[in-house]
Image (cartoon, helix red, strand yellow):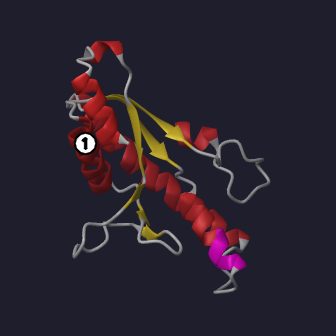
Amino acid sequence: SERLIGQVLKQQQVKREEVVLSTKFGYYMPKPGSPPSPDSIAVRDTQWRYSLHPDVVRSELLGSLERLQQEYVDVLYVHSPEHYVADLLLRGQEGEEQAASPAAIAAEKAKLRTRLCSTFAALEELVSEGKIRAYGVSSNGLAAPASDPAHLSLDDVME
């Protein structure tokens, strides 16, 4: 889709300031023969991985910019940061281990806060470099009730 959008913008000679471009990162397909990126987890039953690591943020954005044939995007979204917790819950449901215990969920959410701090620091660097104008979070976990183990606290994200 990014390649198509880039082609259309170029073919139609759209003025860049007349459009708002946004994209997201989190899920990615590793390059053949390359090891998974740091802090990544497998996305069940696919070849995809998920990571919020700063190296992944930068790599995925640069790939998007190349496909879009653009120098910057207006908004870059952190896509589904609750995936780490959801993966933990799925493992617990499948009986692989007692991964979905309240203590395990709390520990994973604490790690997620640390990950988000690193991610947001990387995003701030990309803003200062002019590669993105703004960033945000795209998450189903934010809308989940607080009682849901996959709930993502907006207060935690903002903090």
Within the magenta stretch, is there residue 36?
Answer: no
Which secondary structure, mark 1?
A: helix
Q: Amino acid at mark 1?
A: Arg
- The residue located at (72%, 69%) in the rendering is 102
Which quarter of the rendered picture does the N terminus lie within?
top left
Whether residue 159 is visible to the viewer of this picture, yes or no, is no
Please name the residue shown 31% across and 55% down the image: 56
**On the picture, is 110 further left or further right than 94?**
left
Q: x and y percent of residue 85 in the render?
A: 60, 63
Judge left or right: residue 82 versus residue 16.
Answer: right
The secondary structure that most of the magenta stretch takes on is helix
Q: Please name the residue shown 65% across and 72% down the image.
A: 90
How many numbered marks appear?
1
- On the image, which quarter does residue 126 sit in? top left
Magenta span of residues:
89-93
Where does label 1 land, which residue?
67
Residue 21, how many percent across, how many down? 37, 27
Q: Residues within 10 Å of mark 1 (few under 14, many from 20)?
A: some
Image quadrant of residue 124? top left
The answer to whether residue 124 is seen in the rendering is: yes
Q: Nearer the viewer, residue 127 or 26?
A: 26
Q: Position of residue 125 (x, y in %)?
A: 26, 37
Residue sitting farthest toward the front = 11
